[in-house]
Image (spheres, rainbow, N blue to C red):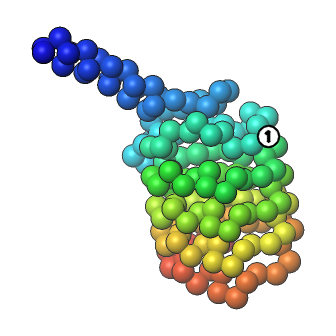
């Protein structure tokens, strides 16, 4: 029985370390100095899409300076610890409705220098902790009424 407990303990620790130490290919990962979780740096890595194997405890995600064109719906759903999201200087044209719905802890969102033309109604409704939202240098011509109304902690737009 004792051998089974030891074996199970070893197997579980290996499985846990694989999940928490996962880092997308070509990116660098480590402990964040700004938030309690993982810092994932995939900036300027020539990525054409958002990596799918980002650790669930990621609190700081850098994806700026790539060639990302599409953000798949649900890609951020398991990243409930995310506080810093940088998607600047990509080729993003559309933001899916509800893409940020689970990111209630998000404080900083950088989307400048993309090709976004429309912000869906209710896009930021769950981001009550957002302090900084950077959307400059996009192709947005009109905004839905009240799109920023729920952003009660916003300091910079």
Q: Residue most toward the front?
A: 1
Question: Which residue is more in the foreground, 126 or 59?
Answer: 126
In x, y percent, where is residue 78? Answer: 50, 51
Q: Nearer the viewer, residue 36 or 119?
A: 119
Residue 16, quarter of picture: top left
Which of the 4 image quadrants contains residue 144? Answer: bottom right
Task: State the image coordinates of residue 109 (x, y, percent, origin top left).
Answer: 62, 60
Q: 49 or 2: nearer the eye? A: 2
Q: Please report the residue visible at 56 percent of the width from the left and 30 percent of the height from the top.
A: 23
**Residue at left offset 56%, top offset 39%:** 54
Q: Is residue 21 toward the left or the right of residue 116 in the image?
A: left
At 17% from the left and 11% from the top, the residue drawn is 3
**Residue 97, position in %: x, y?**
68, 68
> Within 10 Å of the Cα at label 1, are there few (<14), some (14-19), or many (20+) other Cα atoms?
few
Q: Is residue 151 above or below residue 114?
A: below
Q: Is residue 107 above or below residue 150?
A: above
Question: Which residue is painted at 50% across and 79% down in the image?
Answer: 152
Pinpoint residue 22: horizontal percent, then vertical percent.
51, 29
Answer yes or no: is residue 75 visible.
yes
Element type at mark 1 = loop
Residue 50 versus residue 95 in the image, above or below: above
Q: Which residue is mark 1?
A: 48
């Amino acid at each position: 029985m004792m051998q089974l407990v030891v074996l199970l303990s070893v197997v579980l620790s290996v499985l846990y370390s694989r999940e928490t130490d996962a880092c997308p290919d070509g990116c660098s990962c480590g402990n964040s100095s700004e938030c309690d979780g993982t810092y994932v740096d995939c900036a300027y890595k020539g990525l054409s899409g958002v990596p799918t194997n980002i650790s669930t405890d990621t609190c700081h995600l850098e994806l700026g300076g790539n060639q990302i064109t599409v953000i798949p719906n649900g890609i951020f759903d398991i990243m409930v610890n995310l506080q810093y999201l940088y998607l600047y200087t990509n080729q993003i044209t559309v933001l899916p409705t509800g893409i940020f719905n689970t990111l209630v802890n998000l404080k900083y969102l950088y989307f400048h220098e993309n090709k976004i033309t429309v912000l869906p109604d209710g896009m930021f409704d769950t981001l009550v902790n957002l302090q900084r939202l950077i959307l400059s240098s996009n192709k947005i011509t009109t905004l839905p009424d009240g799109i920023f109304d729920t952003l009660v902690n916003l300091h910079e737009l």
